């Protein structure tokens, strides 16, 4: 009965109906009573104090007065019409002005004159006024089932407002909802945890988060709901990890044989870093344990993740298994194929490439050879997960830039063998440890935190439009010494709304400054066909063009050792993580490389901090920490497309201590009671079961 009420479709809540229910669903993903209950306000306005008009001293804050409308009139014509009212208490008078809903306000003022008015006062010509203040019935407090002193403000949208769902309407619906369902809200934590940590009961927390009686209860409600979100996220991740380790056996790679040793001793072009050696040791231990491996390999741009993955693929081959590497784009997948094919050229191993662009005759031959076990390494794009791609004995899967793939896509590779293959997912987006333990809490983590020997730190400079001639001179100097240049733009075509130095305009300028026959300028952007992009990239790789103009399609993985200059136009328009990824496209060889950040003179404080951070450090982990402090984990939430980070109230950065505490508590609970069968854990077990049941559980797969 309780569950049924919470899962009642939102349209049956008084005041909603089918039309508003459709808006709730489309705009806010609110389908049931329970969804609305967990649609938290983004902030509260303090209505606990009623001020006197004479107490007004400054602008800026929302404030409320109690008094009477002494006089009102409608002035102006047509679009300039406004309703102006004189509102007084026993200490003074303030002018109230409405430009919209004039007829409705007029009818309200004709019915009664006593109100609490709420709004933001402004001072003009020594007179105080409020534009579009809220008019509140002073006797409303007595009729409400919840306290109304701290008024909630809810995020909404233009479509929702037009459909009658503004913040005020949502708040009224929440009052109605709480009155109906407060008694059926169940507890999720044990009495022991609630008592020892002095947490609010869940029922009270869910009521107080919307309509708190005071600031102290609002803070306690916020803490309790953050605690629940983080604890159950950690419980879910750790439980998945436990289930995978118990349920799924893995291939045992006991041999390090000819393929690995021959490549390592005869064909590896450089010495591995200590970090690469440590990671290989960690993963070898996993692959020999008899458990199916799910591991994240994290490393900064240029740290040598791919060569590390190749060495591990050779261990799989030494043990009689096939391997594959999946990358998110045709360009990146083709680059992996070309590099690995070249590195293994003198070895008796078959490496093939498969993508959506592979022609049918070639595709058929590859699929046949794959199923017969003739192919050792298959490299490609999403095409690898198609049902027609059948391996004879897949033992090891590498997924590059894995945040570009959905969880279900990765799961399809996982199912390509009766005994699931070992899975290594790689990312060049450094993530601080506390965030990684939540984003990737069901994966084991390996980190390459050292750059290969001989790599010189990239010199980064911030330039303005006045420096453009100096920029052209520097580019010419680098090109004349045999080097190449990337120039990245945020747009393809000039936008009327944003004053950006667009790609096509940049192309005209560059071809004018660097004319044929001495220079050649190429161009790559997202609207080009894959074969066109590949053609232009290949020309750049082959040194047929000296300058490559691009949008961010070259952000990830493109490796051109001869390119030593990265120019980023309108750098203030890019996120810090993206800037760092773009910078990582140069500095791939032994030559000194440069990243030049071009920006306008008008910069926000956050833009200044981002560009300053880029100039100040090459360390991706430090960049990630700064980025998260400035921007929060928004982009990183895309790294797990399974709802893992669908937090409604917790914040992985601001709540770092709580993240660590709940992770440790989740570990203790599961170490003490892996199946959650003890009496004290029955509420936790029930709630965790409900969460896992609601979600399509691909998470345990990768």
Image: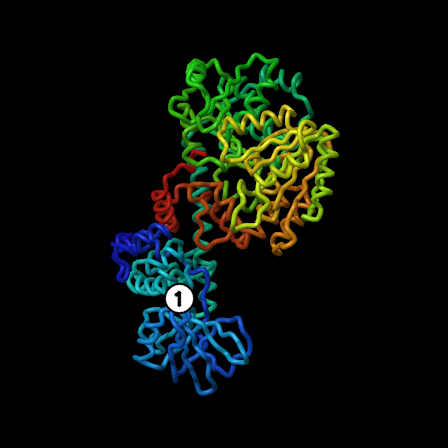
Q: Depth check: give the residue in front, 54 or 230.
A: 54
Above or below 388: residue 556: below
Q: Position of residue 455 (x, y in %)?
A: 71, 32
> What residue is drawn where x is 53% and y is 71%?
60
Above or below 488: residue 604: below
* Residue 673 in sight here: no
Q: Position of residue 626 (x, y in %)?
A: 61, 49
Mark 1 packing: few (<14 Cα in 10 Å), some, or many (20+)? Answer: many
Q: Depth check: give the residue in front, 247 or 38.
A: 38
Q: Position of residue 377 (x, y in %)?
A: 51, 20
* Residue 165 in sight here: yes
According to the picture, the residue beneath numbered tag 1 turns out to be 211
Taking the view exactly as shown, the residue that stands out farthest to the top is 348
> Dividing the image into 4 quarters, which one contains the C terminus?
top left
> What residue is drawn where x is 62% and y is 15%?
262
Q: How many marks?
A: 1
Above or below 124: residue 341: above
Q: Position of residue 636 (x, y in %)?
A: 51, 44
Q: Is residue 338 left or right of residue 39?
A: right
Display coloring: rainbow
> What residue is drawn where x is 35% and y is 45%?
689
Q: Quadrant of residue 482?
A: top right
Taking the view exactly as shown, the residue that stands out farthest to the bottom is 90
> Dividing the image into 4 quarters, which one contains the N terminus?
bottom left
Q: Secondary structure at mark 1?
A: loop
């Amino acid at each position: 009965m309780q569950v049924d009420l919470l899962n009642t479709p939102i349209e049956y809540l008084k005041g909603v109906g089918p039309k508003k229910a459709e808006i709730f669903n489309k705009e806010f993903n609110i389908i049931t009573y329970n969804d609305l209950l967990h649609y938290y306000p983004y902030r509260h306005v303090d209505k606990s104090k009623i001020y006197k008009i004479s107490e007004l001293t400054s602008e800026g804050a929302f404030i409320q007065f109690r008094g009477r409308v002494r006089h009102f009139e409608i002035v102006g014509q047509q679009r300039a019409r406004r309703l102006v009212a004189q509102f007084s208490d026993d200490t003074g008078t303030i002018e109230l002005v409405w430009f919209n809903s004039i007829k409705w306000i007029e009818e309200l003022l004709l019915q009664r004159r006593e109100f609490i008015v709420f709004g933001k006062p402004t001072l003009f010509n020594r007179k105080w006024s409020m534009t579009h203040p809220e008019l509140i019935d002073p006797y409303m407090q007595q009729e409400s089932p919840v306290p109304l002193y701290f008024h909630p403000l809810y995020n909404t949208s233009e479509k929702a407002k037009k459909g009658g769902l503004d913040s005020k309407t949502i708040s009224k619906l929440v009052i109605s909802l709480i009155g109906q369902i407060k008694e059926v809200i169940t507890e999720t934590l044990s009495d022991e945890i609630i008592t020892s940590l002095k947490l609010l009961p869940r029922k009270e927390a869910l009521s107080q988060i919307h309509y708190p009686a005071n600031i102290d209860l609002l803070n306690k409600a916020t803490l309790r709901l953050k605690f629940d979100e983080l604890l159950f996220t950690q419980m879910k991740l750790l439980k998945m990890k436990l289930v995978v380790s118990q349920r799924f056996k893995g291939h045992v790679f006991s041999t390090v044989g000819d393929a690995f040793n021959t490549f390592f001793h005869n064909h590896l072009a450089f010495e591995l870093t200590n970090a690469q050696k440590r990671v290989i040791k960690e993963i070898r231990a996993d692959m020999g344990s008899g458990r199916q491996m799910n591991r994240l390999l994290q490393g900064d741009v240029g740290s040598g993740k791919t060569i590390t993955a190749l060495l591990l693929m050779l261990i799989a081959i030494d043990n009689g298994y096939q391997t594959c590497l999946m990358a998110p784009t045709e360009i990146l997948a083709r680059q992996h194929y070309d590099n690995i094919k070249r590195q293994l050229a003198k070895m008796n191993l078959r490496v093939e490439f498969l993508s959506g662009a592979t022609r049918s005759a070639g595709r058929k031959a590859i699929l046949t050879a794959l199923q017969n076990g003739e192919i050792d390494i298959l490299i490609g794009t999403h095409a690898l997960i198609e049902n027609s791609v059948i391996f004879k004995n897949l033992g090891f899967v590498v997924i590059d830039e894995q945040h570009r793939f959905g969880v279900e896509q990765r799961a399809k590779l996982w199912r390509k063998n009766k005994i699931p293959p070992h899975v290594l997912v790689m990312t060049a987006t450094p993530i601080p440890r506390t965030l990684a333990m939540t984003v990737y809490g069901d994966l084991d983590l390996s980190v390459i935190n050292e750059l290969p020997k001989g790599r010189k730190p990239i010199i980064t400079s911030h330039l303005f439009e006045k420096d453009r001639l100096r920029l052209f001179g520097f580019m010419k100097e680098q090109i004349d010494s045999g080097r190449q240049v990337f120039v990245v733009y945020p747009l393809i075509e000039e936008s009327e709304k944003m004053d950006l130095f667009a790609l096509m305009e940049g192309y005209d300028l560059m071809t004018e400054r660097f004319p044929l026959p001495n220079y050649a300028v190429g161009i790559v952007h997202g609207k080009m066909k894959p074969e066109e992009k590949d053609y232009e990239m290949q020309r750049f790789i082959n040194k047929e063009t000296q300058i490559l103009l691009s949008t961010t399609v070259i952000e990830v993985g493109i490796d051109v050792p001869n390119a030593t200059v990265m120019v980023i136009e309108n750098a203030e328009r890019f996120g810090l993580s993206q800037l760092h990824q773009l910078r990582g496209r140069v500095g791939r060889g032994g030559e000194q490389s440069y990243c030049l950040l071009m920006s306008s003179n008008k910069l926000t404080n956050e833009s200044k901090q981002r560009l300053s951070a880029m100039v100040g450090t090459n360390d991706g982990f430090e960049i990630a920490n700064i980025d998260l402090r400035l921007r929060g984990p928004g982009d990183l939430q895309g790294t797990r497309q399974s709802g893992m980070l669908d937090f409604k109230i917790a914040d992985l950065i601001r709540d770092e201590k709580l993240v660590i505490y709940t992770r440790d508590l989740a570990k203790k609970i599961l170490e003490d009671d892996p199946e959650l069968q003890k009496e004290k854990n029955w509420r936790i077990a029930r709630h965790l079961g409900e969460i896992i049941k609601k979600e399509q559980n691909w998470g345990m797969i990768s």
